[in-house]
């Protein structure tokens, strides 16, 4: 009886496949223009224009020739404060650029951003077979929030054979009322140390000045618990919107790299508070999380064949992690056009 | 001084006399008719039987014990008493004094010429209750089945406002709520997981159930602890007079059932057991249909069993004690699956290998879960007005999963020879990752409850009560991840371990105690207006914290005429336990957790309004709209993972809110050779997580995973002959929502460099193709001389084999990457035979 029933089931179903290849509409599958840019006052403004790639267009031999994603022939227009118009021109990338990504496509104009400027960017191209549609975006360059140094303490700490020149700084941020701000903090500590050490080749005692610098710092303040990036933490003003907020950071420079430190001169700590647009803040936050779950940093990520959106070619990726949304503020396309303004304070000891 | 009434005054007096006298007369000339509706053979009460007074165009539903009480004028009255599956009786009474009657109804085992479905009058046009429906068990048993299994939960999915979690799954979403927001009870005891075989069938044996009621809104105050729905199932008592039994053999499982007296007229038993052989028949068939058998990984080798037992004892007609026991377990074991991919690049001129990449993986899973229930109910009727029902139950749900994988990668690439300048040699970089995760999630609950019911003539229908519960949770996830590496150009013989992550999340018991008191009153305010007002107070104590809630409830009915009524309702609800479910995990690790100091009660407010129309006894129509608002919703944060070291589950949760609204249409034909219903829902369900440290989707609103814009279900049952009937179902709704990254592009990093990776447009922004299917079944009945009945059923699930996609995976067609969708349930024919005596 069981065999008969089994045969009936198999007979009824065996010719009926239960799979199908998903198809996508033109809107879902079309490749789109990607704009990435960061506007900062008093810096050249350039943007990077490339194309996206739909999953179905991926190829296993793709990654040695990602060059085809670069968009060199496009009309990119920049309008500032609804009146000043600029045409952004394609600039051949510098092959000796520090940026390892050889696919950067830079568009440049004579415009120099200022805090408070409202930018409108539009990109158009009809020079490629991918038939890209126009994309556009708006961004307003924020005014830099004030940061001031309230108190500074310095001391040298010795732990075993290690010795650190340590600085503890109390800072105050003044947050403007009525807008949601994101911030990023950068701390750079540097000093010159006069070392004496034994030259291994000659065996003689040598002395010289060595510059040391570090961009890491530590803080137990609650505002930094939101950030996953330890060296350039980002945080929002939710805890102190419209108010002045004080917090403490510690920074140190390892003095024990070469030997005995005889003297230290020009110790300097510079603290830079970058005021970010809201879009850009959420974007950086998402990047930090996604890079953690992908176990990668800023390297070119995909080098080999890709298995698709449900799996990754980088097998160290955490498959249990919830997906991370990377925000985009480019209409009809992808990418992030962010803006920030900086305020810097320097302490020289 | 003499006063004489003027003509106007005489008119007024006469008018006053006419207005006052009839009510006074009526008050002096009414009597109470009370009684009980019972099964003539088994002597079991028929709960919610309809008692309708034709002269008054009004009526009442009997209570759980089959009792009713009506205040009627003296004189001749016709009482029509009906209950689904039973022959309707009409009693002609001449009332002069208070009367007590016993109405004996006979079950009609043969297919009657007219099919009387359970009237919704008790929850429909005459009642102040809205957003509720009672589904006759007999009607459920006649619907087409999946692999011959009658499934109560799947029948509920055919009602407006209710959706299936996925194709073939027994879980439900109700009015945009989450899966864990539904309270499902068996004889008053909460069952936490209603799924066997990963949802293919429900854990509830329909043979044991006598009545199913679903509440979606306007909740009376006696219900609490869940936001979206209450599904009440009453378990049948055994026959007090005779022995009955039956057996069913199907493609998926077999079951046996027996009931009868332990002491005639006093004590009865009802027992049923089921066991499956899914892995022997169905899975081999399914495997032959899939190009990629990885799609069946989740289902592995699955089987289940469950046992139900109910005992009932009557101390007297007014005093009854019942006990119900349930145990059910599932097991899924997947055989280790292996997967190998290889890609290479060669010099186009010399065909020399430039680099290659090979990836091998092996994965396995063991998964068990189950429920245990024990409940005791005591009901006692003190007098015609007051009755008490008390309940004590223990419920335990356990869930365990272990999943492991071994992944190896060999990357072969060219390096410059350090000795022979300009020469390249190929070298291997080998990595291996060995990981496993084991998760345990359980919840145990002990509850004591007492409910009092007091009827004050036809004025008040008062209920009040108290509930006390203690629950314990033990969510534990243990993970281990070890990574090894070998670089041949350094040392081809050396593999070193470069990363070990081992962690335990949870691992200690959490306890919560709660208490609730409530009061509700169903009041006829005028002859047209009736309202049910209630208040519930609840207190929760856990993690050194106490939460309290006050939950007002209100629903009202206004009768425009005897065929049409308008209704409105409001309910404020609280929920103190949650199921954390990461739908993105390959191996689900659902955890039941209570509220804590950090995470407060989830709350909801729901408003609903609608109309009910019953032009005659044959048809009924209802149209309802609702708006629901939910606060303190929990979801896993973006990027949260159990593989993070030192991650407490509380650190992985984001808190946000949601809202849903919709319109539901329900049209039903209850009587005739052809019966059935049409249910259509238009709805929208959204989520928003935008608070600091709780950001999902960049703080922008996104569609809930259970957002379906349209949902259409049509059912029909047609009596072909007196021994055969045909049933069919049609269902349609848009495809499920998923988060799928389909676009790859360069992003600017915080270091001012570029990274090329995948991204998705928004959370739950991708929608699978639309879902629709048609099921058909034929029932052939054979009636034997000894009173036994045989039922031969042929069912065709997904008649036209529409490929309803539930699972998506990446594959290649030639060199082109494609996404493939798998339908878990293609055309599935089944046959079963049931013998009942």
Image: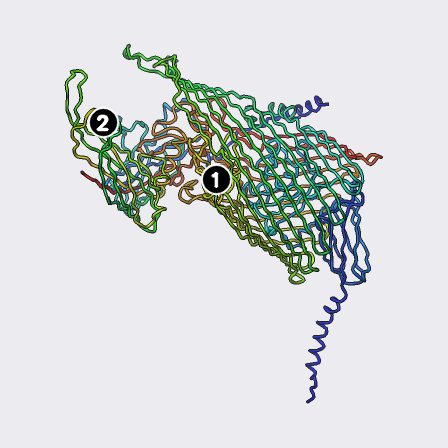
Disc 2, SS: loop
Q: Which of marks 1 and 2 is in front?
A: 2
Q: In this view, does B309 lie above or below B50?
A: above
Q: In this view, does B174 lie above or below B254?
A: below
Kindly give the residue lying farthest to the right in the view shown: B785
Q: Position of residue A98 (x, y in %)?
A: 27, 28
Q: Quadrant of residue B444?
A: top right
Direction from residue B338 to residue B4 in the image, left or right: right
Quarter that holds the C terminus of chain B: top right
Q: Nearer the viewer, residue B76 or B438?
A: B438
Q: Where is residue B594 in the image (x, y as percent from the top left)?
A: 51, 41
Q: Where is residue B335 in the image (x, y as percent from the top left)?
A: 56, 22
Q: Nearer the viewer, residue A74 or B507?
A: B507
Direction from residue B66 to residue B628 in the image, left or right: left
Direction from residue B394 to residue B310 in the image, left or right: right
Residue at 16% across, 24% down: A196
Q: Nearer the viewer, residue A159 or B710?
A: A159
Chain letter for the residue marked with disc 1 in the picture: B
Q: In which quarter of the image is residue B165?
A: top right
Disc 1, SS: strand
Reading the image, the residue beneath label 1 is: B635
Quarter that holds the N terminus of chain B: bottom right
Residue B761, can we see it? no
Q: Which of B290 and B515 is in front in this view?
A: B515
Q: Are the residues under badges 1 and 2 in a single subunit? A: no
Label 1 to label 2: alpha-carbon separation: 48 Å
Direction from residue A82 to residue B685 in the image, left or right: right
Kindly give the residue lying farthest to the bottom in the view shown: B1
User: Badge 2, how many Cα within 10 Å: few under 14, some, many 20+?
Assistant: some
Reading the image, the residue beneath label 2 is: A256
Q: Position of residue B306 (x, y in %)?
A: 66, 32
């Amino acid at each position: 009886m069981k065999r008969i029933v089994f045969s009936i089931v198999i007979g009824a179903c065996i010719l009926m496949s239960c799979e199908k290849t998903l198809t996508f509409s033109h809107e879902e599958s079309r490749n789109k223009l990607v704009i990435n840019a960061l506007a900062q006052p008093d810096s050249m403004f350039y943007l990077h224009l490339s194309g996206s790639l739909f999953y179905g267009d991926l190829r296993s031999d793709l990654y040695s020739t990602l060059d085809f994603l670069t968009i060199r022939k496009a009309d990119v227009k920049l309008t500032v404060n609804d009146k000043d118009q600029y045409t952004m021109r394609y600039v051949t990338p510098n092959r000796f650029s520090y940026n390892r990504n050889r696919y950067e496509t830079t568009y440049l104009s004579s415009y120099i951003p200022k805090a408070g400027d409202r930018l409108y960017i539009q990109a158009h191209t009809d020079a490629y077979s991918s038939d890209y549609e126009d994309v556009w975006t708006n961004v307003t360059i924020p005014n830099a929030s004030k940061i001031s140094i309230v108190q500074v303490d310095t001391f040298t700490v010795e732990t075993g054979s290690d010795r650190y020149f340590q600085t503890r700084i109390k800072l105050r941020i003044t947050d403007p009322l009525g807008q949601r701000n994101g911030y990023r903090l950068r701390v750079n500590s540097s000093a010159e140390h006069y070392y004496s050490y034994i030259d291994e080749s000659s065996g003689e005692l040598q002395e010289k000045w060595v510059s040391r610098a570090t961009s890491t710092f530590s803080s137990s303040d609650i505002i930094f618990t939101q950030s996953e990036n330890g060296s350039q933490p980002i945080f929002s003003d939710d805890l102190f919107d419209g108010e002045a907020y004080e917090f403490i950071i510690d920074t140190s420079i390892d003095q024990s790299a070469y030997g005995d430190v005889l003297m230290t001169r020009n110790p300097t700590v510079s603290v830079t508070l970058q005021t970010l647009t809201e879009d850009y803040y959420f974007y950086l936050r998402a990047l930090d999380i996604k890079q953690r779950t992908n176990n990668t940093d800023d390297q070119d990520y995909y080098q080999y064949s890709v298995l698709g959106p449900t799996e990754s070619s980088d097998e160290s990726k955490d498959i249990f992690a919830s997906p991370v949304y990377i925000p985009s503020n480019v209409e009809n396309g992808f990418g992030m056009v962010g803006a920030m303004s900086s305020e810097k304070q320097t302490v020289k000891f | 001084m003499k006063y004489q009434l003027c003509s106007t005054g005489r008119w007024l007096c006469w008018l006053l006399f006419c207005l006052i006298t009839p009510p006074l007369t009526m008050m002096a000339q009414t009597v109470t008719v009370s009684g009980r509706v019972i099964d003539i053979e088994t002597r079991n009460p028929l709960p919610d039987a309809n008692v309708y007074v034709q002269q008054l165009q009004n009526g009442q539903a009997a209570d759980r014990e089959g009792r009713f009480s009506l205040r009627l004028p003296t004189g001749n009255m016709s009482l029509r008493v009906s209950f689904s599956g039973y022959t309707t009786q009409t009693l002609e009474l001449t009332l002069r004094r208070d009367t007590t009657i016993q109405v004996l109804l006979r079950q009609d085992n043969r297919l009657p010429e007219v099919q009387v479905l359970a009237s919704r009058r008790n929850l429909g046009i005459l009642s102040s209750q809205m957003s509720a429906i009672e589904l006759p068990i007999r009607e459920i048993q006649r619907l087409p089945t999946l692999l011959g299994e009658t499934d109560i939960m799947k029948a509920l999915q055919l009602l407006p406002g209710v959706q299936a979690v996925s194709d073939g799954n027994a879980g439900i979403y109700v009015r945009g709520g989450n899966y864990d927001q539904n309270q499902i009870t068996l004889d008053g005891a909460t069952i936490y997981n209603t799924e066997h075989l990963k949802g293919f069938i429900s854990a509830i044996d329909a043979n044991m159930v006598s009545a199913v009621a679903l509440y979606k809104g306007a909740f009376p105050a006696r219900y609490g602890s869940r936001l979206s729905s209450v599904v009440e199932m009453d378990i049948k008592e055994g026959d007090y007079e005779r022995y009955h039994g039956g057996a069913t053999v199907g493609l998926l499982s077999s079951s046996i059932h027996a009931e009868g007296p332990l002491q005639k007229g006093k004590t009865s038993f009802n027992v049923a057991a089921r066991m499956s052989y899914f892995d022997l028949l169905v899975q081999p068939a399914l495997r032959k249909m899939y190009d990629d058998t990885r799609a069946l990984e989740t289902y592995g080798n699955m089987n289940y069993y469950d046992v139900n037992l109910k005992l009932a004892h009557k101390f007297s007609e007014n005093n009854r004690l019942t006990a119900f026991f349930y145990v059910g377990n599932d097991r899924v074991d997947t055989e280790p699956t292996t997967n190998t991919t290889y890609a290479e690049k060669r010099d186009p001129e010399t065909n020399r290998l430039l680099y290659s990449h090979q990836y091998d993986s092996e994965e396995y899973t063991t998964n068990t879960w189950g429920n245990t229930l024990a409940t005791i109910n005591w009901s006692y009727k003190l007098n015609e007005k007051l009755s008490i029902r008390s309940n004590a139950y223990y419920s335990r749900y356990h869930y365990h999963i272990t999943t492991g994988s071994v992944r190896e990668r060999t990357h072969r690439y060219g390096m410059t020879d350090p000795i022979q300048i300009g020469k390249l040699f190929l070298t291997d970089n080998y990595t291996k990752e060995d990981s496993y995760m084991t998760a345990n999630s359980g919840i145990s609950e002990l509850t004591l409850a007492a409910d009092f019911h007091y009827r004050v003539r036809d004025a008040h229908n008062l209920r009040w009560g108290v509930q006390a519960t203690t629950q314990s949770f033990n969510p534990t996830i243990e993970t281990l991840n070890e990574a090894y590496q070998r670089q041949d150009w350094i040392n081809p013989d050396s593999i070193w371990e470069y990363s070990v992550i081992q962690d335990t999340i949870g691992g200690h018991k959490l306890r919560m105690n709660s208490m609730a008191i409530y009061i509700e009153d169903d009041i006829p305010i005028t002859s047209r207006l009736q309202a049910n007002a209630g208040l519930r107070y609840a207190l929760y104590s856990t993690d050194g914290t106490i939460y309290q809630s006050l939950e007002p409830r209100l629903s009202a009915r206004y009768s425009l005429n005897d065929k049409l009524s308008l209704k409105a309702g409001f309910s404020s609800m609280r929920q103190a336990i949650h199921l954390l479910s990461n739908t993105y995990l390959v191996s689900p690790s659902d955890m039941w957790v209570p509220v804590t100091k950090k995470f407060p009660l989830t709350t909801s407010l729901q408003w609903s309004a609608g109309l009910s129309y019953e032009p005659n006894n044959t048809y009924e129509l209802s149209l309802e709209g609702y708006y629901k608002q939910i606060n303190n919703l929990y979801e896993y944060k973006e990027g949260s993972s159990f593989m993070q070291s030192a991650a407490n589950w509380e650190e992985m949760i984001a808190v946000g809110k949601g809202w849903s609204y919709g319109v539901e249409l329900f049209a039903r034909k209850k009587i005739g050779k052809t019966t059935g219903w049409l249910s259509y829902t238009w709805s929208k369900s959204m989520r928003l997580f935008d608070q600091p440290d709780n950001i999902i989707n960049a703080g922008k609103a996104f569609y809930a995973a259970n957002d379906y814009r349209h949902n259409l279900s049509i059912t029909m049952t047609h009596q072909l002959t007196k021994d055969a009937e045909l049933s069919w179902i049609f269902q349609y709704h848009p495809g499920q929502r998923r988060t799928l990254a389909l676009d790859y592009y360069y992003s600017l990093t915080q270091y001012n460099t570029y990274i090329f990776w995948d991204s998705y447009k928004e959370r739950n922004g991708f929608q699978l193709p639309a879902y629709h299917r048609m099921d058909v079944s034929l029932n052939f009945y054979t009636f034997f001389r000894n009173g036994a009945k045989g039922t031969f059923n042929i069912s065709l699930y997904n008649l036209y084999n529409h490929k309803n996609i539930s699972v998506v995976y990446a594959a290649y067609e030639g060199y082109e990457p494609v996404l493939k969708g798998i339908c878990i349930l293609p055309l599935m024919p089944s046959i079963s035979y049931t013998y009942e005596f």
